[in-house]
Image (cartoon, rainbow, N blue to C red):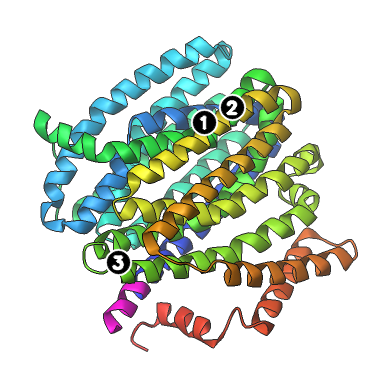
Amino acid sequence: MEKSKDEGHGVARNAVYLLAGKIISTTLGLIFVIYIAVELGLTQFGIYTLGHYFAGIFVIFGDLGLNNYTTREIARNRNDAQGTINRIFSFRIVLSLLAFTIGVNALLFIDYGIYIEQLTIIILFTHIFFKSFLSFIIHIFEGFERMEYITISEALRRGLDLAIGIYIVSQGYGLTYLIIGLVISDLIILIFTWSLFYYSLPVRIQFDFTTTAWYDTLTSAIPFGLLLVSLGVINSIDTTMLGKISGETEVGLYGAVIRITSVLSIIPLMAATAMFPATSRLYFTSLEKARSIFLNLIRLMTYIGLPIAVGTTIIGSSLIVLVYDTTFLPAALPLKIVIWSIALAFLNLPMVMFLSSIEKQKQATIIIGIGAIFNVIFNFILIPEYGMVGAATTTVISQIIILYFCSRRIIECLDQISWQPILAQSLTGSLGMALVLLVLPDMHAILLIIFGAMSYLTIMIIIGAVNRKDWQDILHLFNPTR
């Protein structure tokens, strides 16, 4: 029993390391995005956003699930970590070259215009050859559960991006020089992280062009790859379609919404990432321990995700003005809609990662694939008529579909799970918070956030949803010897 507690606290401590690093890096990243959005204007920011989301689709084809496969295989068998790294690194080089070639041809086929195409090719290059290999090293750190190095790398990357971005834009050099400056930043961080990897882990990155090893690796990783392709469709297809159908200005507005919600999505992503190595390992020794870790995580994600969605729906307009300025007010309605997809992602991400960690990645892939298919269908129906509001609505519908199928598979794997008490408690706290926000007079958005959070936490304590044991567990994260 004590060992089970140590496993759970190990996951929680990893989550704290990752979350702390992400808070720092995301704060810096958000400052960067807000600054360039306001300074460059909606059209230029729309081009920047379109380029990044377009490139994000083809990065997935250069990965094909190899990153998550790397984390899982290293976590399960560190004695063979060197062989795993060699095979995957060599394979990724070939896949990256193919992904870049396909991406450039797809970009020319869509025909966004020569200026957008030139900038997007630069972004595509740095995503596939710099950021993608940086992500590979990050997943090696995850496999060894050295989350502190991930924190250092991410924080430094965002800090350097911010410094370079502010300097270039403030000097009036414009979007082209900004993108070139960010390429240089990515190269510097890749070299730094590789050095960190070289001096901190007992493995090296080497070539292994054995075709048999490639085949075995690909067949094992492809379910993760299909999963990532489907997620990429859900996360990026709306933005690329908006760019073609509605233009760069609307992409700029929708990009402003996505930047806010992507900050919030880091919470479930980091929690699920911290869970993944431990549940992958525990699957072979104790499914009950893995089950306990997962259920505790779902409880926490429900308690966080639902009040965020309710609160943002109420004060969405104030948030847009707080983060950007009144120019971006048309983005308030899409924000109020798409925030519910984030609340659902607080549950979906841990469920998908858990299924993948216990050899159910094929089921997870099918579920996300179904969501991606519906996402494409509804985007084609709604975006031409409703623009970014249609894109936001489609994102929510996709997450609802994923939640339905994921919850059914989880129940099959873990027998009976009682969701109702957790949901009822969070709903009670969220409705109480909503009443407080609705009766408050007009005030600054930061004050509304503070009052909303305080009222929610107070209600959760009163109804017993948050208790003394929860506080003790939090303290234990920072002092495990207690």
Residue at coordinates 56% horizontally, 35% vertically from top-left?
168
Is residue 7 left or right of 107 when viewed as pictured? left
Q: Can you give x and y, in whole percent of width and height, for residue 130 in the image?
A: 35, 35
Magenta residues (range) = 1-8
Does residue 220 show up?
Answer: yes
Relative to 328, residue 77 above or below: below
Residue at coordinates 76% horizontally, 39% vertically from top-left?
328
Mark 3–mark 1 contact, CB under 8 Å? no
Residue 395 is a magenta residue: no
**Distance between the alpha carbons at the discs numbered 1 and 2:** 6 Å
Which sits in the foreground, 256 or 345?
345
User: Which residue in the structure is indicated by mark 2?
Assistant: 377
User: Which residue in the structure is indicated by mark 1?
Assistant: 373
**Distance between the alpha carbons at the discs numbered 3 and 1:** 32 Å
User: Which residue in the structure is indicated by mark 3?
Assistant: 287
Check disc 2 and report its element: helix, strand or loop: helix
Residue at coordinates 52% horizontally, 69% vertically from top-left?
418
